[in-house]
DNA sequence: ACAAAAGTGTTCTCGATACACCCATGC
DNA sequence: GCATGGGTGTATCGAGAACACTTTTGT
């Protein structure tokens, strides 16, 4: 370590992974171990191996550091400010990812140290260029809600229109008209009714819907 | 060379720079010298220096390889497929850039080898992941015409509405209604009339317009 | 009965589209 | 006078926004 390859930047991926849980947008952070800034919370990520594609690296780091697999993942931007990391030149290929709330229970994997979901009102101060990455990721996600089907990746497999609307309202930070919202999302033709209803125990049961293409995110409109 | 830093990917920038010239969309390519694939046309670009920011690197390479300065430049995507380059692992941070037609005359700089503008109907076959990069850049540019003011970077400082419309039609590959186009672009409030007219010698002289913020590209609509 | 969220239609405004003719200049 | 591109207005359509009340369940 230390002087290895000092004539090339280090290439790393960094992931901002979001979930909407308990009426708040949450971001996953991990504690960085055995490093200069150990004990500080940082975005998950790590160096890219020579024989590994960029997205594979992002998925591997999510799995290793937080036990998370199979989420929607999209490249965001590459940050490479010369002075971003005092330990040396790093080029961070940033990704953002999203995950449904029924999967935020974290499996603490052995070698991983800790991982934890933070609300945006209680985010710790982030090192390096991670603050900038989170801001860009959040902006991109908010924008994509309006012209893609990402939102279905942020709700359980079966969901109510109320839950879906909550995702929009929390991420975009603005209330929406219920009738207009329902008309718009149904008009997309990307979700279908199920026969089931969800009974939350304190009000009228809501019909459950399901994405027609649960595995993929499409550009719409 | 050769075995240097073989434990880290090489980080390079690659630029797809476009201009609309003589009724066609054109792309700048350079001949790669003293390399395995010398004498093949490739996108301009090169390795990122340790003490150099990514965008600075892109601008330096454009200047060195084609004498081009001061253009609009935007990061596109980072390509890092393991097998993209047979010489070793490369992570290509791709940019796209645009330039007005009155600047496509190339200054052949001394160390640069050749640079040349190619129409899309006569593009050579590109090595590595360059074909993919060009396709992505073109798609992004076509999309950005509709929600930003990039188009003003593709026409001279003073331009006619006919020229501007031609830029849209050529890049998006579809004819537009003249009256609707003019109404829409004028309604943006981003350009202003000048007193001058351009006389092309074979029809009625056209009024010249100028961007209000010639230096910057804004998101609109 | 009351609290809590589900469910449901109509009106209005504004931006996008379709469409055809006269004008100024060079040859 | 003819060829070439410049310049102009109106009618229609559809998407998005505003807006309030009834229904179903649990307590």
Image (cartoon, coloured by chain):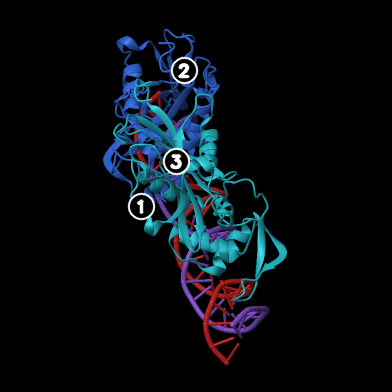
Chain colours: A blue, B cyan, C purple, D red
Comparing marks 2 and 1, which lies closer to the viewer?
A: 1
Could you say whether the residue bearing mark 1 is in a helix, strand or loop? loop
Could you say whether the residue bearing mark 2 is in a helix, strand or loop? strand
How far apart marks 3 and 2 lie (CA) works out to 25 Å
> Along the line of sight, which residue is nearer the eye, B124 or A205?
B124
Chain bearing tag 1 is B
Question: Image quadrant of residue A73?
Answer: top left
Question: Image quadrant of residue A48?
Answer: top left
Mark 2 Cα-neighbour bin, 10 Å: few <14, some 14–19, many ≥20: many
Q: Are marks 2 and 1 on the same chain?
A: no
Q: Give the label on residue B124, or none.
A: 1
Chain bearing tag 3 is A
Q: How many marks?
A: 3
Could you say whether the residue bearing mark 3 is in a helix, strand or loop? helix
Which residue is tagged 3?
Answer: A144
Q: Position of residue B196 (x, y in %)?
A: 71, 66
Residue at the extreme right of the image, as rendered:
B195
Mark 3 Cα-neighbour bin, 10 Å: few <14, some 14–19, many ≥20: some
Comparing marks 3 and 2, which lies closer to the viewer?
A: 2
Q: Are marks 3 and 2 on the same chain?
A: yes
Q: Position of residue B138 (x, y in %)?
A: 43, 50
Question: Image quadrant of residue B82?
Answer: top left
- Are circles 2 and 1 on residues that touch, CB within 8 Å? no
**In the figure, is residue B159 to the left or right of A28?**
right
How far apart marks 2 and 1 lie (CA) works out to 45 Å
């Amino acid at each position: 370590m230390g002087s290895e390859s000092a004539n090339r930047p280090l290439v790393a991926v960094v992931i901002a992974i979001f979930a909407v849980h308990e009426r708040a947008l949450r971001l996953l952070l991990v504690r960085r171990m055995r490093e200069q800034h150990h004990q500080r919370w940082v975005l998950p990520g790590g160096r890219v191996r020579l024989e590994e594609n960029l997205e594979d690296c992002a998925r591997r780091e999510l799995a290793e550091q937080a036990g998370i697999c199979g989420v929607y993942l999209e490249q965001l931007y590459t940050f490479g400010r010369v002075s971003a990391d005092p330990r040396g030149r790093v080029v961070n290929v940033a990704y953002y990812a999203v995950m449904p709330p029924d999967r935020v229970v974290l499996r603490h994997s052995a070698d991983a140290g800790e991982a934890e979901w933070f609300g945006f009102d209680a985010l710790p101060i982030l090192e390096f260029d991670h603050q900038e990455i989170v801001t860009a990721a959040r902006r991109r996600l908010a924008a994509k809600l309006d012209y893609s089907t990402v939102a279905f990746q942020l709700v359980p497999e079966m969901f109510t229109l109320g839950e879906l609307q909550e995702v929009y309202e929390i991420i975009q930070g603005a209330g929406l008209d219920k009738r207009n919202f329902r008309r718009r999302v149904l008009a997309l033709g990307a979700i279908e009714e199920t026969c089931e209803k969800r009974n939350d125990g304190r009000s009228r049961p809501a019909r459950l819907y399901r994405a027609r293409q649960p595995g993929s995110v499409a550009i719409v409109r």
